Image: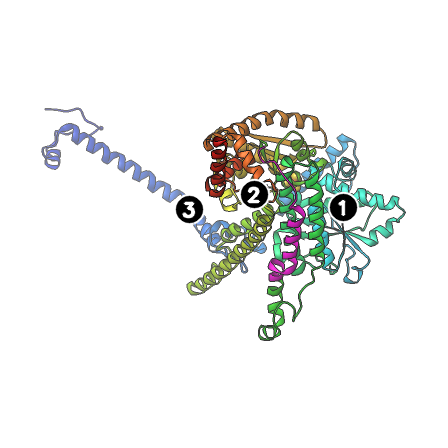
Amino acid sequence: MRTTPVYPGSDLDSRRDRRIYGSLSESCISRLKNAVLEAGVAFAWAAYAHLRYEPFLHSYSSFTQDFGSRRCENEEHSTPGEALFMIPDSERPDTSTREADIERLREAARHRLHARAGVPVEPIAHYRREAERPFLASERDRVTILFGGLTVKHERLIQAVFDSCGYRALALPQADLASCQIGKQYCNNGVCNPAYFTIGALLRYLQQLEASGLSRETIVDRYVFFTAGSCGPCRFGMYEAEYRLALRNAGFDGFRVLLFQQEHGVKADTGAPGLKLSLHLGLGAVNAFTFADALQAFGYETRPYELSPGLTDRRLARAIEAVAQALAGRRELVPPDGAPRWMYRLIGDKRLKPYANAYDHLYGPATKGALGACRAALDDIDVDRFRVKPVIKITGEFWAQSTEGDGNFRMFEFLEREGAHVLVEPIGGWVMYLLQYQRVRIFARRGLTLPKDASRLARLAARLREERGLWLRRLAVEVGEYLYRRQYDGVRDAIGVAHPLLDQRELARIADPFYRELARGGEGHLEVGKSIYYTTRNAAHMVLSLKPFGCMPSTQSDGVQSAVLARFKDLTFLPIETGSEGELTAHSRVQMALVEARLRAQAEFQRALASTGRPLDELRRYVDEHPELHRATYHVPHRRGVAGVAANFVLHVHDRMRRDRRWRRARVDTMAVGQGA
Ligand code: SF4
C-alpha cells in the first residue's frame, strides 16, 4: 500500500523506513518525521543567529557584568541597579553635549515664554537662608521669648515652666480672624490655614507693640519667637521659612525665630545658646501638657452638666493658676538635693542628676502639691449627670482640632450651646503618636546601615551591634510612653476625668487596611483610626473632623474615609473644612448632623435605663441622698460600648444601689413604717 508522502521525497513504503519504525502506524511515523524536520529547522535558525549576533551578545554580557560588579568606594551597593548610579564620574559616558543641548533648548523656551508673556527675563536667584543674629545666653534677662499656637491653658502652664527655668517668656494672644487676615497679607499664597492664623497672631502682637511706642529696632532686639518645626512632609515643613518671610514683609527684618524639630524628641535643640532645651525644661513641659490636657478634658466633661452656669470655668481658672504657681516655683535639683549625698558621691553627680530630676518631676512634692491644688479648686462643682447629651468626638488636623478660637469657627463653644458633650483630643495624644511613629520607624530601618562588602563575620558583628542599638532605642520609647501615660493617668484619676489616652498600637492596627502608619503628614493615619475606633466601640455618638482649608494630609484622609464609610455603615462622620470664611455653613451642617447624634444618645439612655429595671425618679432620689454623686470630681466608670455620660451614670448608680445594703435596709424600714401607718 502506498501512502501520501508527508514531505517531498519522503516515502514510508521503503524497506528502510519499515526497518527503522517497525510496526508504528503511518500517521505516527508521519508526525515523528514532521517533528524531526521542525527541530532541524529551529536548530539551523539558532546556529545562524548565534553566528550572526554573537559579537553583540558578548559585548552586552561583559557590559552588564562590568556594571554589576562595580562598587562605589565609599558606599555599599550590591545590585547592578544600585551600582549603575555609583559609577565614578571619570567612567561615565560623555553626556555633556546632550546636557548642553537640553539646557540650550530650555533657555530658548524660557526666553520665548517670557517674551510671549511680556515679562523681562531675569537671572534666577535661588533662596538662601540668611544667617540670623544668634540669641545669646547673656541676653536672657532682657529678651522675651514669644510662643503660641496652643490653648490658653497649655500656654499658661508652659509659660510657668519657662519661668521656672529662668527665661522671660510670654504667650501670644489667641489667634482670631484679624490675625488670619494679617497672615494672608504678609505670607505666601497657598499656605495652609493654621499658618495664616499663627503667623498673623505673631505679627499682630508685634504691630501692637509698635503702636504702643516701641521702635521696630527695639522689638527686633528684645523679642524672639519660639515654635515647633518639622521637615515635612506636609506644609508644616515650610512654616519656619514662612515665619521669616512674613516678618520681613511686615518690616521686622532680622526678627529671630527659634525652632525645635519635633521629630528629634529629647534630642531637640534650638541651636541658640540663649534657649537650651534642658531636661528640666523638657520634664516641666511634660508636666505642663499632662495637667493642661487633664484640666481641659475636665472642663469639657463638666460644663454641659454643671448646675451653676459658669462655675466650671471660674474654678478651672483657679486650678490652672494653682498648677502654674507650683510649676513656676520648681527649681532644678542639684547635688545634694533630692538624694543623699553618699549616693551622689557613689554614682556621680552627672549620672544621678537627671534621674533625681526626673523622679522629682513625676512624683516630687511640687507635682503632688499641684494635684492637691487642682482637686481642691474643682471639688465644689455640682453636676446633674442625668442630662442626656450626645458625645461628639473631635478629630482632624492637629491645630484645627485643638484651637479654641476662630481657627475652627469656635466649634466647641457652638457644640456646647447646641447641647452636645465635646470630647476633645489631648496634646498628649500627639505626643503618643510621635512615640509610636518612632517605635515603628526604628525597626523599619533595620539593616540599612549594614556593610554589604564586609566579610560574613564582620557583617554578623555589625548586625548584632545594630540589633542592640535598635532594642535599646525601642526600650527608651517604651519607657517614655509608659511614663507619659502614667503621669497623665495620675492627674486624670485625681480630678475624675473619664477618658484615658488612646492606645496608639490599636489605632494603627485598625487603620492599617486603609492608611499605613508610616505614611506621614498631618495626623497621618490617626483620623481614619479614630473614626473607626469611636464607631466600632460605640465610644461617641458622632465623629466630627475639623481640618483647615488647604490641608494636604486631611484631603488624603477624606479620600480614604469614603472607603471606611463603605465598610462601616454605622459611622456618623462629618468632615468640616475650616477656612476663614464659611462659618455659617459649617455650623448649619453640624447642626443637621447633631439631630441624628441626639437620637442615638436618647436611644442609648433609654436602653440603659430599661436594663436597670428602675424608674428614673428612684435613681434620682438615690443620687440626691448621696451628695458625692453630684460632685464633678466623682469618677463614674466608663462602660465599654456605652458612650453617653447619662447612660453610664444610670448603670453606675444602679450598681451602687444593688451593692448598698444599708440603703436597701433603710428603704425597707421606711416602707414598713408607711404600711403600718
Ligand atoms: S497638617 Fe495640613 S494644615 Fe497642618 S501644617 Fe500640614 S498641610 Fe498644613
Crowding at mark 3 (Cα within 10 Å: few <14, some 14-19, many 20+):
few
Q: Tell me the residue that label 2 is attached to.
A: 498
Nearer to me, 598 or 584: 598
C-alpha separation, residue under disc 3 versus residue under disc 2: 74 Å
Q: Is 366 inside the magenta-drawn segment? A: yes
* Span highlighted in magenta in the image: 358-386
Circle 2 or circle 1, nearest the eye:
2
Q: Tell me the residue that label 1 is attached to.
A: 172
| Residue at disc 3, secondary structure | helix
- Point out residue 424 in the picture as x, y percentages from the top left corner: 61, 39
Q: Tell me the residue that label 3 is attached to.
A: 57
Q: Residue furthest right?
A: 213
Q: What kind of colouring is applied to the model shown? A: rainbow
| Residue at disc 2, secondary structure | loop
Q: Is 225 inside the magenta-drawn segment? A: no
C-alpha separation, residue under disc 2 versus residue under disc 1: 31 Å
Ligand 1 image-quadrant field:
top right
Amino acid carrying mark 3 in the image: Leu
Amino acid carrying mark 2 in the image: Ala
N-terminal label among 2 and 1: 1
- Point out residue 545 in the picture as x, y percentages from the top left corner: 60, 34
